[in-house]
Image (spheres, helix red, strand yellow):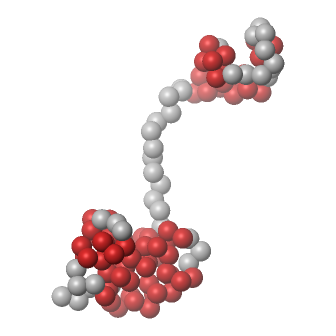
Amino acid sequence: MESPLVPFKDTLHRLSRTDPDPRVRHRAQGLLIRCSSPSQAQAAKLLGTGAKQLRTWTDRFLAEGREGLVDRKHPGRPPKLDAAAREVLETALAASPLDYDYHVTTWTVVDLADL
């Protein structure tokens, strides 16, 4: 069965060579490999990624074009400090430890945690 990416080979080739984002270039190259490989698993192995990841790139590219190959935002772990604690920290960092009755001239992590 022919890959659904075959009609986009010229676009993928251009993206893999000229796109300013190195991740987009890498992903476009992977999709080009997918176009000429007999199986998705073999293409993923040649690229050094998983078949599921390659499938995700394919689906996103087919739905969104180049924008589908751009990194998505990663939410990450939520901050441990709430807004009030963050404000205290920012205020302390803008001042000297001497202003807070610490007998040092440079903040340390231990002193900031104590504060």
Regarding residue 112, the answer to whether it shows in the image is yes
Residue 27: give x, y in percent of width and height: 43, 73
Q: Quadrant of the C terminus?
A: top right
Q: Quadrant of residue 63?
A: bottom left
Q: Quadrant of the N terminus?
A: bottom left
Residue 53: give x, y in percent of width and height: 32, 65
Residue at horizontal 57 percent and vertical 82 percent from the top: 18
Residue nearer the viewer, 87 or 44: 44
| Residue 50 sits above or below residue 35 on the image | above
Residue nearer the viewer, 11 or 40: 40
Regarding residue 88, the answer to whether it shows in the image is no
Exactly how many numbered labels are in the figure?
A: 0
Q: Residue furthest left?
A: 1
Residue at horizontal 35 percent and vertical 82 percent from the top: 33
Residue 22: give x, y in percent of width and height: 54, 70
Residue at horizontal 37 percent and vertical 73 percent from the top: 47
Residue at horizontal 56 percent and vertical 71 percent from the top: 21
Q: Is residue 54 left or right of residue 77?
A: left
Q: Is residue 58 left or right of residue 84?
A: left
Q: Quadrant of residue 99?
A: top right
| Residue 13 sits above or below residue 56 on the image | below
Residue nearer the viewer, 109 or 14: 109
Residue 88: give x, y in percent of width and height: 66, 21
